[in-house]
Amino acid sequence: MKLIILAGGGGSRLFPLSRTCMPKQFLKLGNSDSLLTQTVKRFLPLIKPDEMLIVTNKEYIHHVKTELTACGAGSAHILLEPVARNTAPAIALATKFCQDELGAGDDEVMFVTPADHIIHPIDIFIKNVRQAADLAAQDRVVTLGVKPDKPETGYGYIQAGQVVGTGYQVASFREKPDRETAEQYLAAENYYWNSGMFAFTCGCITEEFREHAPEIYQLMSASFKEVVNQFDNMPNISIDYAVAEKSARVVMAPLTAYWNDIGSWDAIYDVLDKDYAGNAIKGDCLPLDCANTLMLGGDRLIAGIGLEDVLVVETNDVIVVAKRGESQKVKDVVAELKARGRREVDEHTTMYRPWGSYTVLGEGTGYKLKKIIVTPGQQLSLQLHYHRSEHWIVICGTARVTIGEQQQMVHGNESVYIPPSTKHRLENPGKIPLEIIEVQNGSYLEEDDIVRFDDVYGRA
């Protein structure tokens, strides 16, 4: 069996903690592991890393590599989508990769899962996956459904029909309902939440694309390399719309483990531990006479007084406050900010790079202050800037600095100056993280004023 983990995403539903540069699968929410790492780990008892395939995009590849290595799955395959095209094209591309590059036959089962769900306990989940795989081996498209315990309006629903082995024939798929309809689904007892997880064989899904999504099938009929080259011609469509809602082969396997897709701040509130008043608190927060409230702090103290059923999420550049039950509308806030050209949609003040990270501490006309952290053994590209100079002050660790043709070691409480239009490089040859304060001065201070000459991460 091959595991396909879909790890794209736009970073809008958990704004401001998630952004385009850091979608939710890389966040650590009430756990020391990110959601992506948790996803990989829950499959390790069943599937070897070299049978796993992470589908993502080039912007996230270094995040993915770092997390796979950290959780002992460094041999997993990473497949980069040339452009974002929703789940059906991503699955088609992954299927072609498994066939052409991994030698998967038509009867090989593929299990597809998003990278950003919370599921436990693992032993029950593994049992559910095995059941789904057994159904998929019978030439069926299998979707996993979750028995609802409340009238949730944020999920799509699956109507279960007659019993098929350990699952049910799917009678219909239903869109996200309003509250009244969701209550009717809950009362009917044969409706399940759509988890977004699927199982099928390579041959079965290929036949389904041929019958129900010929525009995808035509493109995936070529070699893997040609499919990649033509990927931007794929339609932007989900696997639900492209195949599942049209196919007569679809069955549902019940997911009996706990499941949460972490699709909103309301969902985050549900999974976090609560105090005696029902408050979910994380970070430097002081709730006074508050009840059933989420307070998620970052760099600053949050003091809440008399709050009830409120969500407060703080980062060092954005604060979001919402009523519980309304957090699905955060994506509307992101859309409005995007329309206004606000960079908060795409960027955190802390940005992660393959060599470490940088945090913008302050900026104004003609200057910008950054804290740069370089992990041991890593280095920035050999580069220059046309419009700015830089001062580097070492706070912790030891830096190897190249300026022009000269190289020198810079230690704590020492500094160097890099003039404009001068090639330079920063390296950490030591055993502990290198921390420096960078002071930029110039007429243009954006990140695109970088000319790279040599880069170990392939960005030159």
Image: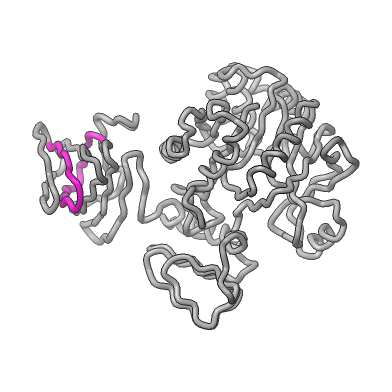
Is residue 402 shown in magenta? yes
Q: At 56% across and 64% down in the image, what residue appears?
A: 273
The residue nearer to you, when weighing 310 against 80, is 310
Q: Is residue 321 left or right of residue 107?
A: left
Is residue 101 shown in magenta? no
Q: At 60% across and 73% down in the image, what residue appears?
A: 278
The residue nearer to you, when weighing 294 against 446, is 294
- Could you tell me what secondary structure mostly forms the magenta stretch? strand
| Quadrant in the rendering for residue 251 | top right
Q: Is residue 192 left or right of residue 411?
A: right
Whether residue 321 is situated above or below residue 41 in the rendered picture = below
Q: Is residue 318 left or right of residue 197?
A: left
Name the residue furthest right. 162
Quarter of the image where the N terminus is located: top right
Q: At 69% across and 57% down in the image, what residue appears?
A: 154
| Quadrant in the rendering for residue 205 | top right
The residue nearer to you, when weighing 15 against 277, is 277
| Quadrant in the rendering for residue 448 | top left
Q: Position of residue 59 (x, y in %)?
A: 44, 39
Residue 90 in view, yes or no: no
Whether residue 221 is situated above or below residue 257 in the rendered picture = above
Q: Position of residue 176 (x, y in %)?
A: 73, 54
| Coloring basis for residues | one colour
Residue 2 in view, yes or no: yes
Q: Position of residue 332 (x, y in %)?
A: 58, 60
Q: At 47% across and 39% down in the image, what residue appears?
A: 71
Q: Position of residue 338 (x, y in %)?
A: 49, 55
Quarter of the image where the C terminus is located: top left
Q: Which residues are magenta?
A: 381-403
